[in-house]
Image: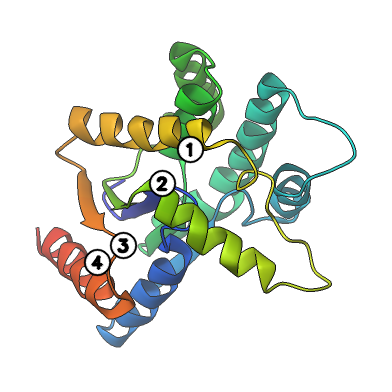
């Protein structure tokens, strides 16, 4: 689907802010655009998100974690992403299949072929036409993420992944860079460690360059 664009990156890379700004910018260019996220995007996805992203009273096994992400994606693709694409909208998605490969594959050590097969089964092998990877050193990303979490009061903190050991996050970043190396035709790597405006400028440049094709 040539109108489907994913934003990816480690914790604290700023992709959620950048995808919101990108959606607002594309609207000023007269483009009909849907911005969505994973896990989330649907009522079921939001329930699964609460389970997956918040530290609970029990540990979630890696395989259960994988299947919960897949379940959220099935509903998301069926109810949100595909209908929007069929209506001719541009879809900007905050995380998609590459996040599962990076986090549950590289990070948790689950079989990459199993993840691919689950995706093919659950989402008809839907793949973004363009993937914006906001990259930065893991230490900086975690510093930003934990500072953001520390400012939250009385709400779900969504800090389950941020509390993982540093080595886990290093593996996730390596996973993303490995994917970018294997799929240079759709990946665009942007330095997310810079000022917000500088990153936004590069994101918009990559989006417009892609859309003009």
Q: Is residue 176 above or below residue 188?
A: above
Nearest to viewer (mark 4 / mark 3): 3
User: Disc 3 versus disc 1: distance between alpha carbons?
Assistant: 16 Å
- Return the residue at label 1: 169
How packed mark 4 is, by other alpha carbons closer than 10 Å (few <14, some 14-19, many 20 or more), is many
| Mark identifier at residue 138 | 2
How packed mark 1 is, by other alpha carbons closer than 10 Å (few <14, some 14-19, many 20 or more), is many
How packed mark 3 is, by other alpha carbons closer than 10 Å (few <14, some 14-19, many 20 or more), is some
Q: Quadrant location of the C terminus? A: bottom left
Q: Whole-percent x and y of residue 94?
A: 47, 56
Instruction: Tell whether label 2 touches label 1 (CB within 8 Å).
Output: yes
- Return the residue at label 3: 193
User: Disc 3 versus disc 2: distance between alpha carbons?
Assistant: 10 Å
User: Disc 1 versus disc 4: distance between alpha carbons?
Assistant: 23 Å
Nearest the viewer among 141 and 106 is 141
Residue at 65 percent across and 41 percent down: it is 72
Label located before the other in sequence (4 or 3)? 3
Q: Quadrant of residue 170?
A: top left
User: Disc 4 versus disc 2: distance between alpha carbons?
Assistant: 20 Å
């Amino acid at each position: 689907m040539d109108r489907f664009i994913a934003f990816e990156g480690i914790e604290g890379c700023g992709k959620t802010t950048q995808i919101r700004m990108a959606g607002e910018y594309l609207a000023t260019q007269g483009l009909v655009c849907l911005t969505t996220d994973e896990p989330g995007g649907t009522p079921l996805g939001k329930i699964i998100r609460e389970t997956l992203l918040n530290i609970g009273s029990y540990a979630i096994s890696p395989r259960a974690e994988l299947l919960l992400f897949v379940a959220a994606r099935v509903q998301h693709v069926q109810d949100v992403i595909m209908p929007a694409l069929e209506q001719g909208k541009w879809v900007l998605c905050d995380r998609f299949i590459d996040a599962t490969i990076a986090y549950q594959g590289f990070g948790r050590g689950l079989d990459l072929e199993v993840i691919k097969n689950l995706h093919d089964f659950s989402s008809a092998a839907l793949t973004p036409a363009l993937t914006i990877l906001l990259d930065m050193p893991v230490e900086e990303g975690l510093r930003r993420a934990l500072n953001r979490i520390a400012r939250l009061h009385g709400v779900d903190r969504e800090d389950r992944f941020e509390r993982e050991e540093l080595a886990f996050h290093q593996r996730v970043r390596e996973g993303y860079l490995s994917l970018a190396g294997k799929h240079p035709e759709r990946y665009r790597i942007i330095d997310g460690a810079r000022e917000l405006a500088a990153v936004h400028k590069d994101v918009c440049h990559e989006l417009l360059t892609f859309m003009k094709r």
